[in-house]
Each structure stands twice: as C-alpha cells, then as structure tokens.
Image (cartoon, rainbow, N blue to C red):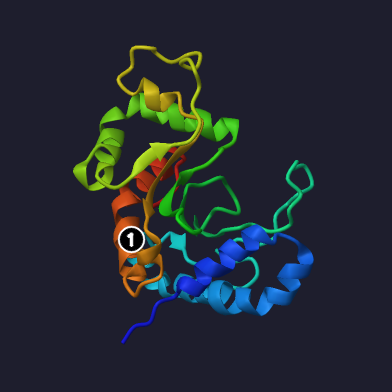
Amino acid sequence: MASAYFTPATMRFLRDLANNNHRAWFAANKPRYEDVLRQPFLRLIADLQAPLAKISPHYVADPRAQGGSLFRIHRDTRFANDKTPYKTWAGARLRHQRAREVEAPSFYLHIQPKECFVGGGLWHPQPETTRRVRDFLADNPASWKKATRSRAFASHFTLGGDSLVRPPRGYDPAHELIADIQRKDFAAWEVYDDAIATSTELRPFLVERLGRIAPMIDYLCASLDLEF
C-alpha cells in the first residue's frame, strides 16, 4: 500500500519554522527537516520522473539532493529587507532540459501550510523572453485560447502574476488577447488543501494537474522555439 510523502508533521515543521526562523532553531531541528520535508520531497520528485516523461520527454524531474529540482531551504537575503534565513515553504521546479542554456517555462510544486499549489509557466521572465511571448500571443491567439480557456484548464487553474497597466508599445490595444499581452508573468496555478498534500493521493493528483497545464507550457515553449 502506498504511503504519503508528506504528513501533518510536515505542516507542523513548517509552521514551527515560521515562528522560529533563526539558525539556532533550525540547527536543532534539522533532523525534522530531513525526515518530514526534504527527503519525502526528493522521493516525490523521483516518483514524478516517469509520468512527467510521458507528458513531455523534454522536461526533467531531478531528485538530486544538490542542484536538482528541489529549491534550497535557505533564503538569499543579500538584497532583501527581510533577513530571516529560511523559507517557510518548500518548492520544486521541474525544468526543461535546456533550461540551463535558455530561459524556459517550467512546472512548479509548492508545499506550505494552507498555501499548497501546483502550476507552471514563466515567472518574471527577462525582457527579451517577454517580448517573444507577447509577439507569439499577438500572432497565435487561437492556440493560447485553446490552451488556457478550455474547461480542463480553466476549471482548475488561475492565470496570475504581474501585468502592465497599459498595453505595451507596438501592440494593438484592441487585440483580443491584449490582457494576456500586457502580462509580465505568464504563469498559472491551482491551490489545493493540506489534506491532499498529506495523503496518498498527492502523486496521482499532481500528475493529473501537470497534464492539465501542459498545453500552456507547450504554447510557451513554442513561443521560444523550444521542443515540448
């Protein structure tokens, strides 16, 4: 019988970390971090390799402890006003195989008490990437609508992120996708309950949702001349 990757102990650890976000506490509780969060997440990533390859052979779920899909728990505080040293969530980015060469859309998994979500896309892309996506949207509206307006997508995912207040220069303000062309992020996500995150249903749930968002990722890949 399959066992859950995460448990209520995972959520307790993250809540405790949020209330004790300093190095001494984390050092004393690092075994908890390994047992209830990091190692289970690495196992989940490994178990997503085969189903992700069926969705796209060009995307990788990398379960390596260092340099893989899982984000480090340590925050980069060099330029941040918030100097707390640790993230109070855990996330994994399932990257395109060419992501180290070029900017590419990704699938994303997020574990946090009452804020778990699954999604993907381009988050804060570079200006040239943004321009290429906008040009592709302007020239290929039907495929974007098929990817993001379908019942399979829209009944679960919300497009979000930052947008320009006005249409960017050079684009028709009356274009049918002008609201999407104004986006500065091309990402979507679905929030789900902690009960799912801590159940044996998590893996099949995530696999199904990755399949639902795949047409949007495929479209963004096409806009950047990347294989999907």
Q: Is residue 89 above or below residue 45?
A: above
Q: Is residue 222 above or below residue 214?
A: above
Q: Nearer the viewer, residue 43 or 134?
A: 43
Residue at 31% across / 87% down in the picture? 1
Which residue is the site of mark 1? Answer: 55
Q: Amino acid at mark 1?
A: Ile
Q: Secondary structure at mark 1?
A: helix
Res 73 quadrant in image: bottom right
Residue at 45% across / 55% down in the picture? 114
Residue at 57% across / 62% down in the picture? 15
Left or right: residue 44 versus residue 154 is right
Left or right: residue 182 versus residue 35 is left
Q: Name the spot of residue 183 as percent of width and height, x first.
A: 46, 28
Q: Number of callouts in the render?
A: 1
> Is residue 62 visible in this depiction of the protein?
no
Q: Nearer the viewer, residue 218 or 29?
A: 29
Q: Name the spot of residue 216 as percent of width and height, x first.
A: 35, 44
Left or right: residue 160 versus residue 80 is left
